[in-house]
């Protein structure tokens, strides 16, 4: 994991909230994992993801709880290992997720979950009762575990199309958007994660040796999906989001704007595992799934906003990005009463 991968100090505060007494005890814990306690008094400090991972493991050991004390039942030390073991023996990701979610539903009192497949889309739904919503950090920690294990089981990243949460939006969302999806929706009737159902058919082929390596680096290998919001790719995507698609620059003009050569731009993006075309497609996808949640915006208008020649071209691109057609996605995301 590159030390450029960082976590907001806000998430450190959240992790400590129910796991560690304030004052000297907190300072001791933070010093042990290489985080300056003074950073807690700032709003924009960021810490290495590796340090956050060490904090996670230390708090889990001390409290015998891998879920930061956020459920009446502890997710006792060793739960992540058992979750992986009971999932990796299944033939497909669908079966592995079903097994893993059953285990977590048994262990956690307030977060029972169910995997639902609806044509080309799949969702993991938290079957909460009518009690008050959990903290955003609680939900996102749950998704971090589930999604991280799912990606390991499949041997590839599972793209998330949307995450809906019952709770109100927290004061900070940047890290969550980078980790999961730009399409985060709060104050919704239920909490769920939506992704392409094609992923459910992926085979699971993990060995005991691979499990040992995964656990040896967990949770740092789950947190690695965090990227520095100041990275070149993040800055370019942020600029693209604020421009109409027809005004997006080509590579050479963009390089000039950034005061570098086109070859340097391509090299620096490659070092971050990105391409300019990939960034443009990523922003188009993010905008599309946000606008599809607005029934007043027609498919033709979305196509035009995204710079496509017609709605048919948009349909093909969205199917390539998400594994689903826009109509089905809109139907699922708006059908909140089911």
Image (cartoon, rainbow, N blue to C red):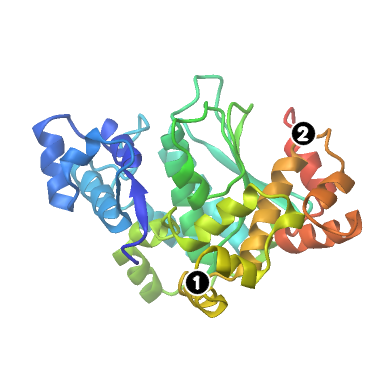
Residue situated in front as seen by the camera: 83 or 313:
313
Q: Earlier in the sequence, mark 1 or mark 2?
A: 1
Q: Is residue 306 above or below residue 155?
A: above
**Front-most of 319 and 90?**
319
Left of 76 or right of it: where is 181? right
Expressed as whole percent of the image width and height from the top left, the position of residue 18 reads: 28, 31
As drawn, 66 above or below 191: below
The residue at the point 56 percent across, 19 percent down is: 130
Which residue shows up at 84% across the image and 51% down it? 304
Across and down, in percent, residue 332 comes to 76, 41
Q: Secondary structure at mark 2?
A: loop
Mark 1 touches mark 2? (CB < 8 Å): no
Q: Residues within 10 Å of mark 1 (few under 14, many from 20)?
A: few
Quick one: SS at disc 1? loop
Location of mark 1 (residue): 260
Q: Position of residue 167 (x, y in %)?
A: 52, 27
Residue 280 image-quadrant placement:
bottom right
Q: Quadrant of the N terminus?
A: bottom left
Q: On screen, 25 above or below 59?
A: above
Front tag of 1 and 2: 1
- The residue carrying mark 2 is 335
**Does residue 200 appear in the picture of this structure?**
no
At 45% from the left edge and 40% from the top edge, which residue is drawn?
Answer: 106
């Amino acid at each position: 994991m590159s030390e450029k991968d960082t976590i907001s100090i806000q998430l450190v505060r959240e992790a400590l909230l129910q796991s560690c007494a304030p004052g000297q005890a907190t300072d001791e814990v933070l010093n042990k994992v290489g985080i300056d306690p003074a950073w807690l008094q700032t709003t924009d400090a960021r810490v290495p993801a590796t340090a956050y991972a060490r904090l996670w493991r230390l708090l889990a050991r001390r409290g015998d709880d891998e879920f930061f004390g956020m459920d009446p039942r502890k997710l006792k030390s060793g739960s992540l290992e058992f979750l992986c073991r009971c999932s990796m023996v299944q033939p497909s990701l669908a079966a592995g997720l079903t097994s893993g979610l059953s285990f977590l539903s048994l262990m956690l009192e307030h977060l029972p979950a169910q995997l639902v497949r609806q044509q080309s889309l799949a969702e993991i739904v938290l079957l909460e009762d009518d009690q008050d919503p959990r903290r955003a950090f609680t939900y996102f920690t749950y998704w971090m575990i589930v999604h991280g294990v799912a990606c390991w089981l499949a041997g590839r990243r599972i793209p998330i199309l949307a995450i809906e949460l019952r709770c109100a939006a927290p004061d900070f969302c940047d890290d969550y958007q980078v980790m999961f999806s730009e399409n985060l929706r709060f104050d919704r009737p239920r909490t769920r994660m939506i992704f392409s159902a094609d992923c459910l058919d992926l085979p699971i082929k993990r060995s005991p040796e691979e499990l040992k390596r995964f656990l040896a680096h967990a949770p740092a290998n789950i947190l690695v999906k965090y990227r520095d919001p100041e990275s070149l790719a993040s800055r370019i995507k942020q600029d693209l989001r604020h421009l109409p698609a027809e005004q997006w620059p080509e590579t050479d003009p963009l390089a000039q704007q950034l005061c570098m050569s086109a070859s340097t731009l391509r090299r620096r993006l490659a070092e971050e595992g990105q391409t300019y075309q990939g960034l443009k497609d990523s922003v188009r996808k993010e905008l599309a799934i946000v606008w599809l949640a607005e029934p007043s915006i027609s498919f033709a208008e979305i196509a035009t906003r995204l710079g496509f020649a017609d709605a048919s071209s948009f349909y093909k691109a969205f199917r390539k990005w998400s594994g689903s057609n826009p109509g089905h996605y809109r139907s699922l995301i708006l059908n909140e009463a089911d």
